[in-house]
Image (spheres, rainbow, N blue to C red):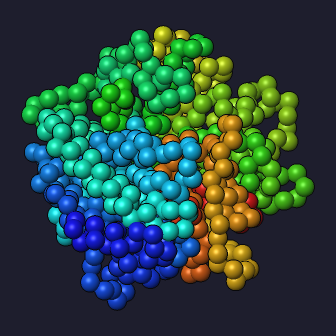
Amino acid sequence: MNQFKKLMMSFHTQEKSCLNRLYIDKQIYLSSVSSSEQPIEEEKIYLYRDLSFQFMGTGFRTPQKLVLFVFIPEHLILGKYPILSYTTAYEDYILKILSDSVNHLSEEYRNDKKSAREKAQFFMQPVSSVVQKRNGCIYLEENKAFRLRIQFQVPLLNGVHVNGKSGFKAIKELLNLITNQLLLIERADLDAHINLYSQQLKIRQYLKQHNLIAFIANGSILPREGDTQKPAGHAVPFVSPPELEVYVPLQNGEVLTGMGIKKGVTVITGGGYSGKSTLLDSIEMGIYYHRRGDGREYVITDDTACKIYAEDGRYICNTDISPFFSYIPGNQKVEAFSSSKASGSVSQAVNIIEAVYGGSRLLLIDEDTSATNFMIRDENMRKLVKNEPIIPFTDRISELKDKEISTILVIGGSGEYLKYADTILLMEDYIPAEKTQYVRRHLCDAFYKNNEKQDCQWTQEKYLQMPATENKFFYSQYVQIENARYIKINDYTADITKMTAVVCDGQINSLAYLMEKILMDTEEGIDLLEKCKQKVQGLIDNTRDTTLSNTHQYELYLEMIRPLDLLMAVNRMRGL
């Protein structure tokens, strides 16, 4: 720490460009090459109490904007569970206990009467209601330590010269805060956090072994408080119908009881405000692991689940829509259909086709957010309208089931899908009742066992035709307006409003970051899905030692996404 203090005092009143002497490998922020592949000077690592720390620059134009890496020795964190088996849960716990305090400290430094450049500023990646991999805290096995990534802006005098005294004081206060917070960790609380994550992993494994696509534990609180992710107060706890109850064995002889949804076609029905959509939304969020107190801790879903919407005005380019359209008026080929503003039925068909191509094994569909003419066509309409180009989803749902792709539908106004259902749930006051046999005996004369249409080509390789430009500089931004979300990269815009599985700003950062990477990737002949898998797989590891610039926060804080999410975002980019 004395070395760091000496440096900061020597910087006092100097030009801010002198701050590059705080860190090593000055070329790291000018390229995307890992620091391990570049010649470096002796590492500049500073020590304070039980912590060590170092800095990274973000560009010559903003030398006062630094990335601060703080290393926490594993012995300060280690509970009774091995770190390498539950690394993600440990990393999440550290971010959870530190990020709010660090960001609050930064707020205390703010002074509305002074320029923002004159006060020290910190920012640490916040956590959401889900536990998953983030680059704001990663475990480095070679260092036997957790590494925090913190934005740090060095305070300046008159916006130009370094305020070394205040900068040193701010770093020391930050490190004291982190150390004191770590000392307050209750091992029982840490172990409970890791234990829950361990149980969630076991439930997901149980689903795969027992032909299930979703599990909702008894006692779960599914409704949310308004537009937040907090559990609603006075909500009715979930109770499984006895016919669908399963028992998931956990460690130490514990058994978790709840509703298991089998593969196939499941219909959720009921009256208005009965909890149908709430149940479907919770199943969608079951692709994630929720932290304690969320209410959905033991709601686990097949991690490829995809919510399907009708998206009026969606951009579509060269997509084979023949599974759901026999022809398109105007002589446009259904095998390579394009539209700058697709209708609800076309967009919903494309969303399903993309989900199947992307490897989804579970489609989630709500009647309220679907195109009616795509979902059903009853016998009277079939007799009246002879030249209907749309092949309704009812004619393909059994074919998808034969391909091991399940569907969960929320239906409130039409009983057409009852004929195809393997499981039927009736929701009343947020409590489900199993009604499959009742419907078969009393309501449906016959169940369709075969498709009315011949098998079709569901998946084809897809390649990205790169724009004819030598300019490889891309400017990205995330734009959010009321009820809409967009990612803009130069002249390309992707509307991700209906990608409801993307729930965190960090995930949107990752989408923008990887979409740029795909645009810059000149390697040809690689299927788009395979390219998305490659980019997502290396997301955290490949960004460990690189920071491109501090202009966009998304380049600093990333959060794991699925290849399916990246694929669907790229397909929505207007102009590609």
**x then y, percent, for residue 212:** 35, 37
User: Could you tell me which residue is drawn at 79 percent across and 25 percent down?
Assistant: 380
User: Could you tell me which residue is drawn at 82 percent across and 41 percent down?
Assistant: 388
Residue 337 occupies quadrant: bottom right
Residue 5, relative to residue 260: is it above or below?
below
Left or right, 395 with respect to 96, comes to: right
**7 or 198, nearer to the observer:** 7
Residue 488 occupies quadrant: bottom right
Q: Quadrant of the C terminus?
A: bottom right
Left or right, 385 with respect to 414, comes to: right
Residue 417 occupies quadrant: top right
Q: Quadrant of the N terminus?
A: bottom left
**x then y, percent, for residue 348:** 68, 43
User: Could you tell me which residue is drawn at 53 percent across and 76 percent down?
Assistant: 60
For this orientation, the residue located farthest to the front is: 13
Left or right, 183 with respect to 28, comes to: left
Residue 570, relative to residue 243: is it above or below?
below
Whether residue 64 is visible: yes
**208 or 151, nearer to the observer:** 151
**159 or 278, nearer to the observer:** 159
Residue 183, relative to residue 448: is it above or below?
below
Whether residue 148 is visible: no
- How many tags in the picture? 0
**x then y, percent, for residue 398:** 55, 40
User: Could you tell me which residue is drawn at 24 percent across and 72 percent down?
Assistant: 3
For this orientation, the residue located farthest to the right is: 330
Left or right, 360 with respect to 574, comes to: left
**x then y, percent, for residue 301:** 39, 39
